[in-house]
Amino acid sequence: MKSINFKGKVGFVTGAASGIGRATAIAFAHEGASVVVADISEQGSHETTKIIKEAGGRALAVKCDVSQEEDVKNSFERPSKPSDVLTSPSTMQV
């Protein structure tokens, strides 16, 4: 599989505290992106951020409940640079 270079880009990943979201955040970081690690679980977001930073990447943990519009808006205001890539592997039950 061909690798995509995300160096200098910002990836915003929801559901990044565990599972597919965590794997996606780590993959973006591995390809050079700075990653906004967004999840309702602050502990999980910080764990993902720690994994990325320990591997030499850049990450910022933000608490974000994707079912709450205000949380989503606030999450996008946290990074100093706008996101280049958004992925939302998080799910919610209705």
Image: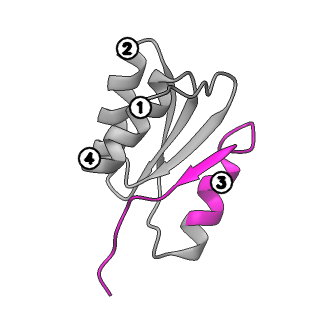
User: Residue 59, how many percent across, how many down?
Assistant: 50, 29
Q: Tell me the tag on residue 76.
A: 3
User: Residue 32, how many percent across, how many down?
Assistant: 56, 21
Closer to the chain start, of discs 3 and 2, is 2
Q: Which residue is identified by label 1?
A: 27
Quadrant the N terminus occupies? top left
The three-letter code of the residue at mark 2 reads: Ala
Q: Which residue is identified by label 2?
A: 55
Quadrant the C terminus occupies? bottom left
**Alpha-carbon span between mark 2 and mark 4:** 17 Å
Pointer 3 with pointer 2, Cβ within 8 A: no
Name the residue located 63 percent from the left edge and 59 percent from the top edge. 74
Q: Mark 2: few, some, or many residues within 10 Å (few <14, many ≥20)?
A: few
**Alpha-carbon span between mark 3 and mark 1:** 20 Å
**Alpha-carbon span between mark 4 and mark 1:** 13 Å
Q: Which residue is identified by label 4?
A: 18
**Alpha-carbon span between mark 4 and mark 3:** 20 Å
**Alpha-carbon span between mark 3 and mark 2:** 24 Å
Magenta residue span: 72-94
Q: Is residue 77 above or below residue 53?
A: below
